[in-house]
C-alpha cells in the first residue's frame, strides 16, 4: 500500500478525476497553507519522480514530474545556474533541444543561451517573473552562444545584449541583425509554440522587414521589457488536463493597431501618483490550485523523509 506521501502525490496528479490509474479516494482535510508561495516553492531543490503534469495557469500553477535541461548541449548553454530554474515539462526540454539544433544546423546560429525556465516543481518564483510557473515557459537570449564553454562565473555575470535603444524605441542596429530575425522565425515555426513575447520595438522591426511572409508574426506578441531576451510559451500538453491555456491570440499578424497602442503606452508621460501605491498582496500557497498544494506537501514530505534517513 502506498505511504501517505505517495497518496498525496497521486492526488496531486489525478486531482478529482479518479480512475483505475488514480485509486486514491480522497485526501484528508488540511488547514489553509498561508505561507508565501514564492518562498516555499523557491526553497525546493529537486522534484520528486512521477508522471509529468503542467497544472494550473502559466502565472498561477506548478509542474509535476519536471525534467531538467542539461546545462550544456552541443548547441546551447544555460545561464544563471545559481537560480536553479532549469526545469520544465518534457515537452519544453525537447523543444529547446530541437530549436537549438535546428537554428545551428539550418540557420548558421552558433548556439542558444538559455535563461530562466521553471523551478523544480514550478510555482511562483522568488523574483523576475509572474509566469514561468507550470514548466512551459523559457527565456532565450538574443546574444549568440560563444564558440567555447562558458565558465560558471561567466554564466552568472555575462550580460545579454540589449536589442533596443531606449531613447528612440527602435532596435539597436549595432546588435540587431537578420540572424536574430531568423532565430525568432524558427522559434515560432513549431506547432507546440503558443506565443513568443518580445519588446514592442522588436515586433515593429519584424513587421517592417518580414516582407510578404508575415503569418509567423501572429505568434510574436509585444510585451513590457524583453529587450535583451525573448520569452517562449508552449501550448498546454495533451498529458496535462489540469493545464489552463491562455485565450487564443488574435488571427492577424499584430502589426497594426495593437502595435500602435503599445508605442502610445511606452511614450506616455507617467502620471505622478496622488498617494503611495499599496504593496501587492503576496500569493499564498492556498491561492494555488489544490493539486499544487498537494504536490508541495508530497515534495516536502519526501525531503523530510530523506533527511531523516541520512
Image (tube, helix red, strand yellow):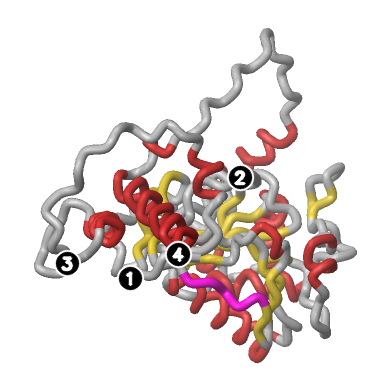
Quarter occupied by residue 272: top right
Residue 159 placement, left or right of 202:
right
Residue 131 placement, left or right of 115:
left
**Residue 277: image tag:** none
Of the image marks 4 and 3, the number of the one nearer the N terminus: 3
Q: CA distance from mark 1 to mark 4?
A: 25 Å
Instruction: Give the residues in magenta.
Output: 67-71
Q: Are marks 3 and 1 in contact (CB under 8 Å)?
A: no
Residue 172 placement, left or right of 26:
right
- Secondary structure under tag 1 reads loop
**Mark 2 vs mark 4: in front:** 4
Of the image marks 2 and 3, the number of the one nearer the N terminus: 3
Of the image marks 2 and 4, the number of the one nearer the N terminus: 2
Q: Which residue is mark 2?
A: 126
Q: Which residue is mark 1?
A: 51
- Residue at left offset 24%, top offset 61%: 3
- Residue at left offset 44%, top offset 55%: 304
Q: Which residue is mark 3?
A: 1
Amino acid at each position: 500500500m502506498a505511504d501517505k506521501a505517495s497518496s498525496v502525490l497521486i492526488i496531486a496528479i489525478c486531482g478529482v478525476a479518479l480512475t483505475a490509474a488514480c485509486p486514491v479516494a480522497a485526501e484528508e482535510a488540511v488547514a489553509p497553507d498561508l505561507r508565501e508561495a514564492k518562498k516555499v516553492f523557491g526553497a525546493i531543490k529537486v522534484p520528486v519522480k512521477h508522471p509529468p503534469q503542467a497544472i494550473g495557469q502559466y502565472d498561477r500553477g506548478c509542474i509535476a514530474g519536471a525534467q531538467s535541461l542539461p546545462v550544456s548541449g552541443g548547441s546551447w548553454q544555460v545561464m544563471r545556474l545559481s537560480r536553479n530554474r532549469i526545469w520544465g515539462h518534457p515537452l519544453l526540454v525537447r523543444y529547446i533541444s530541437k530549436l537549438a539544433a535546428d537554428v545551428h544546423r539550418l540557420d548558421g546560429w552558433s548556439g542558444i543561451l538559455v535563461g530562466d525556465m521553471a523551478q523544480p516543481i514550478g510555482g511562483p518564483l522568488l523574483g523576475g517573473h509572474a509566469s514561468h510557473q507550470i514548466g512551459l515557459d523559457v527565456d532565450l537570449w538574443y546574444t549568440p552562444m560563444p564558440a567555447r564553454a562558458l565558465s560558471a562565473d561567466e554564466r552568472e555575470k555575462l550580460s545579454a545584449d540589449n536589442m533596443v535603444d531606449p531613447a528612440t524605441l527602435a532596435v539597436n542596429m549595432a546588435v540587431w541583425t537578420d540572424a536574430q530575425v531568423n532565430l525568432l522565425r524558427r522559434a515560432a515555426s513549431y506547432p507546440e509554440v503558443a506565443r513568443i513575447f518580445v519588446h514592442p520595438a522588436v515586433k515593429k522591426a519584424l513587421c517592417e522587414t518580414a516582407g510578404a511572409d508575415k503569418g509567423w508574426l501572429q505568434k510574436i506578441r509585444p510585451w513590457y521589457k524583453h529587450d535583451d531576451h525573448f520569452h517562449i510559451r508552449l501550448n498546454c500538453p495533451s498529458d496535462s488536463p489540469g493545464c489552463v491555456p491562455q485565450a487564443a491570440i488574435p488571427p492577424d499578424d499584430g502589426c497594426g493597431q495593437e502595435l500602435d497602442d503599445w508605442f502610445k503606452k511606452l511614450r506616455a508621460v507617467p502620471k505622478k501618483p496622488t498617494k503611495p501605491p499599496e504593496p501587492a498582496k503576496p500569493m499564498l500557497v492556498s491561492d494555488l490550485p489544490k493539486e499544487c498544494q498537494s504536490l508541495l506537501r508530497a515534495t516536502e514530505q519526501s525531503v523530510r523523509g530523506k533527511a531523516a534517513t541520512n
